[in-house]
Image (cartoon, rainbow, N blue to C red):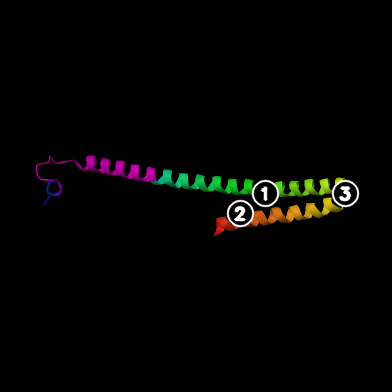
Amino acid sequence: MSAQDDLNAASQPGDEPVSFNARLAQAEARARGKRGKEDQSVTQDVSKADYSALGLALRAGTELVAALAVGVAIGYGLDRWLGFRALFLILFSLLGGVAGMLNVWRAVGKIGA
């Protein structure tokens, strides 16, 4: 049995025989199409992961700064109102820092779980 007979036997009845090179080109085109789709999905997943990591980092920084700013503002306001030098400023700065760290801990814990 020759290669041409194998080619004719593999083709559908009533179809013209397709050359090996044509079938190879079609198979390579299908493989490139599948690889292109896989590469795009992997790239999209990586970019989503990068953006979520960037978002988490920005959120962590914002949480820390915001909590510390609120603590400093409350402490400064209480010191001015009650006539102390820096008692409440120091106390509420520490509380604001702790609250910011707790918020970051909660945010990171949700991502990891």
Q: Amino acid at mark 3?
A: Leu
- Disc 3 from disc 2: Cα separation: 36 Å
Marks 3 and 1 sit apart, C-alpha to C-alpha, by 28 Å
Residue 99, picture quadrant: bottom right
- Quarter of the C terminus within the rendering: bottom right
Q: Report how far apart the C-alphas of labels 2 and 1 lie in the structure.
A: 9 Å
Identify residue for label 2: 107
Q: Which residue is mark 3?
A: 82
Judging depth in this view, the residue of 72 and 31 nearest the camera is 72
- In this image, 4 relative to 99: left or right? left
Q: Which amino acid does the dot numbered 2 rest on?
A: Ala
Query: In the structure shown, which secondary structural element does the residue marked by tag 3 occupy?
Result: helix
Query: Residue 26, image x and y in percent?
Result: 26, 41
Secondary-structure class at tag 2: helix
Of labels 3 and 2, the one closer to you: 3
Among the two numbered marks 3 and 1 on one chain, the one whose residue lies closer to the N terminus: 1
Q: Residue at x 70, y 46 (%)?
A: 66
107 lies left or right of 69: left
Position of residue 109 measured from the top left corner of the image (x, y, whole percent): 59, 58
Q: Residue at x 32, y 45 (%)?
A: 31
- State the mark number for residue 63: 1
What kind of secondary structure does the magenta stretch mostly adopt? helix
Is 35 or 89 nearer to us in this picture? 89
> Going from the N terminus, do you reach mark 3 or mark 2 first?
3
